[in-house]
Amino acid sequence: MSLDELQKRQLELKELVEKLNMPSDAKLMQIAIDDLNNLSLSLEDRHRALQELLILVEPIDNANDLSKSGGLKVVAGELNHSDPEVRKLAAWVLGKASQNNPFVQEQVLELGALTTLIKMVNSSSAEEAVKALFAVSALIRNNIAAQDMFYAERGYIMLQDVMSNGSLDIKLRRKAVFLVGDLAEFQLQYTEKAELPVYSDRLFLKSVVDLIVVLDLDLQEKALTAIQNLLQFKSIEPRILRDFCGLEGALKTMKLQLEESMADENKRDYAADVESLRGEVEMIFRGKLGLL
């Protein structure tokens, strides 16, 4: 072995030793939680601890470990912090940990965090509101008990308010209508459950329909998907969608908007996909009206 090869091998061994001496994820999470429990911790270090947890909780095993160690309770407590950045990061961590994880979802719900997160969506800080809604979505996704709690807390009113407020951050409105579509799809899969009155409420429906003429392709696509799912409910009255919500006119307006978008080379393909979805929704709607 040449001198260069020997030095390279020594460097590799040194790096391996350093790697083996690195603390485990569980240890790193505990350090972050201990920091958060330190009342004298600076705001900057509190942000850092939450940012570290945000990365560490992505693997499902780590999220479970955080729950078992009591770390979720500590993070949930940060939702009430006076600093909006701390609240935002705490909501983000809880959302990340809860994604597709029924065990963590249950633990976070037992801590009462859902009620706080729903209220946080009304924050004047757009970033805090977006992360709070992300966490709400992660908590209740594919979870019947969590969704029952969401409806009991009148979370659908929060969604309606977000969707109908044109001054709010577009990302927040996208997340809201996406959640509506997701909740509707989930309920359709559980046909033994009675259809919830909210999905036939005219004001709620109008808040969804109005989004399909907002000039944002992503938002329009999500709104169309939500309407497509809602149209499958037996309790939906198509005449209310036409006469009160203005769905028929909105679909026509949207068609013209999409034709303009398809003239733009950068938007053409996406706009064509959305137009295809719009056509499907229009066909379903006309069928519900008995016009086919």
Image (cartoon, rainbow, N blue to C red):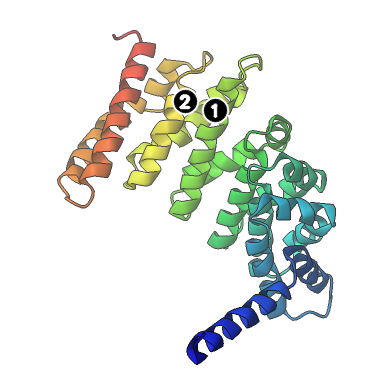
Q: Secondary structure at mark 1?
A: helix
Q: Is residue 58 left or right of residue 178?
A: right
Local packing at callout 2 (Cα closer than 10 Å; few below 14, some 14-19, many 20+) is many
Q: Quadrant of residue 188?
A: top right
Relative horizontal placement of residue 108, taking residue 278 as reference (left or right): right
Q: Are marks 1 and 2 in contact (CB under 8 Å)?
A: yes
| Above or below 166: residue 211 | above
- Residue sitting farthest toward the front: 1
Q: Residue at x 85, y 56 (%)?
A: 70
The kind of residue tagged 2 is Asn
The numbered mark at residue 184 is 1
Q: Residue 277: horizontal and vertical position, in percent? A: 32, 30
Q: In this orientation, which residue lies closer to the viewer: 142 or 233? A: 142
Location of the C terminus by quadrant is top left
Q: Which residue lies at the image location 20% right of the left edge and 45% below the top edge?
A: 268
Give the number of the disc on residue 229.
2
